[in-house]
Amino acid sequence: MERDTTVRPATLKDAETIYALIDRHRDELVPRSLGNVVESIDRFVVAECDGETAGCAAYQIHPEIGDAEAATVEIVSVAVDRHFRMRGIGRKLVEAVVDGVRRFRPHEVMVLTFAPGFFRKLDFEEFPKTEIMHKLYTGCINCTKHANPYTCPEVAMRRRLES
Ligand SMILES: CC(C)(COP(=O)(O)OP(=O)(O)OC[C@H]1O[C@@H](n2cnc3c(N)ncnc32)[C@H](O)[C@@H]1OP(=O)(O)O)[C@@H](O)C(=O)NCCC(=O)NCCS
């Protein structure tokens, strides 16, 4: 039976659950400390399904990518708990973040992901990582998973937004 899912802005009470959800997906997501989740809580949405937190997503603005007045927004920390996958919850989370950031009038949203098939379904298209050197440098400099951001299998993808 299809269960109801609500996507809503996160509250401080959600911080520990979000932290644990991201931590469980440390192979696919950039890890975040609990303190970092708390101070970024206003950028998170969560999905609730039958009273349980099924997933989360957030964003980060990148004034260094593109024109600062229409800066790129990165979709980050997208995670759906394994028990709740393939029911459209990931799509709802990403669309909620995209709708929420439209007020800033970014020219595009982007993502660095190990799940390009999922984002392709959401109308994101691949682009060369060489276009985001600065972001790669600052984001990847402390990553120990891969020797080089260009050989790392994470895929850069974007969706242009109408201004
Ligand atoms: C990727 C992830 C968020 C997808 O969540 P989900 O709730 O299962 O996704 P949805 O059910 O909303 O799927 C939306 C569409 O994408 C497809 N899809 C889902 N996961 C996919 C994947 N890994 N590869 C290809 N397609 C995928 C679904 O079949 C669905 O297609 P449809 O619209 O034709 O039916 C989830 O698997 C996850 O948390 N993965 C680990 C963390 C991660 O990789 N996050 C993304 C990095 S930023």
Image (spheres, grey):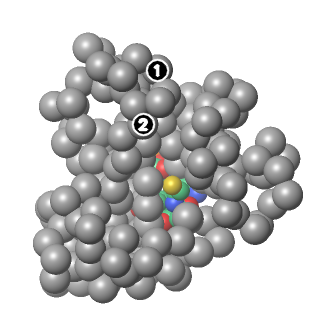
What residue is drawn where x is 30% and y is 19%? 69
- Give the percent coordinates (x, y) of residue 160: 41, 21
What residue is drawn where x is 53% and y is 48%? 118
- Give the percent coordinates (x, y) of residue 46: 25, 66
Q: Is mark 1 within 8 Å of ligand 1?
A: no
How many angstroms separate mark 1 from mark 2 (CA)? 8 Å
Is residue 55 visible in the rendered structure shown here?
no
Q: Are marks 1 and 2 in contact (CB under 8 Å)?
A: yes
Q: In this orientation, which residue lies closer to the viewer: 156 or 82?
A: 156
Q: In this orientation, which residue lies closer to the viewer: 108 or 70?
A: 70
In this rendering, the count of numbered labels is: 2
Q: Is mark 2 within 8 Å of ligand 1?
A: no
Helix, strand, or loop for circle 2? Answer: strand
- Give the percent coordinates (x, y) of residue 149: 76, 47
Location of residue 112 with respect to 125 vertically, above or below: below
Residue farthest top in this picture: 163
Q: Amino acid at mark 1?
A: Gly
Quarter containing the C terminus: top left
Is residue 42 visible in the rendered structure shown here?
yes
Location of residue 137 with respect to 70 vertically, above or below: below
Helix, strand, or loop for circle 1? Answer: loop
The residue to which callout 1 is attached is 66
Q: Amino acid at mark 2?
A: His
Callout 1: 10 Å neighbours few (<14), some, many (20+)? Answer: some
Q: Quadrant of residue 48?
A: bottom left
Quarter containing the N terminus: bottom left
| 14 with respect to 155 (left or right) | left
Q: In this orientation, which residue lies closer to the viewer: 75 or 39?
A: 39
Callout 2: 10 Å neighbours few (<14), some, many (20+)? Answer: some
Q: Quadrant of residue 27?
A: bottom right
The residue to which callout 2 is attached is 62
